[in-house]
Image: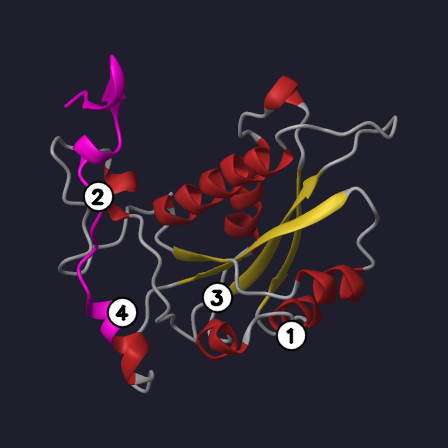
């Protein structure tokens, strides 16, 4: 396993207490290196990490469609992206679509499927960071187009597309995207997020 890549200025998590380096280093860049490749072992590691994510009742609802740049599957996933995502995501080393199983084998509703995909996707992303890659999770894609392109059966719901690659240069990016890449990361304070005793009373 490679060490976590050096975090650009302003991108390390500004936390009130120290965080694990994987969490502090995780961010969602759009500037990806168009020459970087994702090897077979590295690709497999991403999905092993996803496979071992927790899920409700161990139902394991997460399913994935994946392709590396230069492969037809990559182009097919890329074709479902929104116009705003198509430009920069073409430089990704791999594109991954995450889908949730929503109906069990007996045809009954399967609860918490999207939550299970979210947990699996976060495992995948953190494994990518551990191996020196970056990942950007996207809601901007056409779910119906993805269903049709891959003949997704009933009972499975597209949730997210993830671009994985190595951090690249912002040269040539549109101004609005370059500004986003350079902007410091920020989060709401804990006082706005974590309450105790009654709603609105901060724990911290």
Distance from the alpha carbon under mark 1 to that under mark 4: 24 Å
Distance from the alpha carbon under mark 1 to that under mark 3: 20 Å
In this rendering, position of residue 122 left or right of residue 23? right
Magenta stretch contains residue 159? no
Question: Considering only order in the chain, which callout, 4 or 1, is on the residue closer to the N terminus?
Answer: 1
Q: Is residue 198 visible?
A: yes
Q: Position of residue 186 (x, y in %)?
A: 20, 51
Task: Tell me if residue 202 comes above or below residue 41 in the rendering.
Answer: above
Nearer the camera: disc 1 or disc 3: 1
Specify the segment rendered in magenta: 179-204
Quarter in which the N terminus is drawn:
top left
Q: Position of residue 182 (x, y in %)?
A: 20, 69
Task: Tell me if residue 158 comes above or below residue 109 in the rendering.
Answer: below
Question: Considering only order in the chain, which callout, 3 or 1, is on the residue closer to the N terminus?
Answer: 3
Chosen colour scheme: secondary structure
Q: Secondary structure at mark 3?
A: loop
Question: Considering only order in the chain, which callout, 2 or 1, is on the residue closer to the N terminus?
Answer: 1
Instruction: Name the residue carrying label 3.
Output: 37
Nearer the camera: disc 1 or disc 4: 4
Q: Position of residue 202 (x, y in %)?
A: 18, 24
Nearer the camera: disc 2 or disc 4: 2
Instruction: Name the residue carrying label 2.
Output: 188
Q: Quadrant of residue 56?
A: top right
Nearer the camera: disc 4 or disc 3: 4
In this rendering, position of residue 111 left or right of residue 48? right
Instruction: Name the residue carrying label 4.
Output: 180
Question: Considering only order in the chain, which callout, 4 or 2, is on the residue closer to the N terminus?
Answer: 4
Instruction: Name the residue carrying label 1.
Output: 79
Question: Considering only order in the chain, which callout, 3 or 4, is on the residue closer to the N terminus?
Answer: 3
Q: Secondary structure at mark 1?
A: loop
Identity of the residue furthest to the bottom in this view: 172
Quarter in which the C terminus is drawn:
top left
């Amino acid at each position: 396993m490679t060490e976590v890549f050096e975090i650009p200025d302003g991108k390390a998590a500004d936390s009130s207490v120290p965080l694990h380096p994987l969490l502090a280093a995780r961010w969602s860049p759009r500037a990806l290196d168009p020459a970087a490749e994702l090897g077979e072992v590295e690709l497999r590691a991403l999905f092993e990490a996803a496979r071992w994510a927790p899920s409700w009742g161990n139902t394991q609802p997460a399913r994935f469609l994946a392709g590396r740049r230069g492969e037809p599957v990559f182009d097919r996933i890329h074709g479902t992206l929104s116009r705003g995502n198509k430009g920069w995501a073409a430089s990704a080393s791999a594109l991954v679509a995450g889908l949730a199983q929503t109906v069990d084998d007996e045809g009954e509703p399967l609860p918490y499927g999207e939550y299970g995909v979210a947990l699996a996707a976060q495992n995948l992303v953190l494994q990518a960071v551990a191996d020196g890659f970056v990942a950007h999770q996207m809601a901007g894609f056409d779910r119906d187009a993805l269903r049709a392109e891959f003949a997704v059966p009933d009972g499975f719901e597209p949730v997210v597309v993830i671009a994985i690659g190595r951090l690249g240069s912002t040269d040539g990016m549109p101004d609005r995207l370059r500004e986003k890449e350079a902007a410091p990361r920020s989060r709401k304070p804990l006082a706005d997020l974590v309450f105790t005793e009654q709603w609105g009373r901060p724990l911290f």
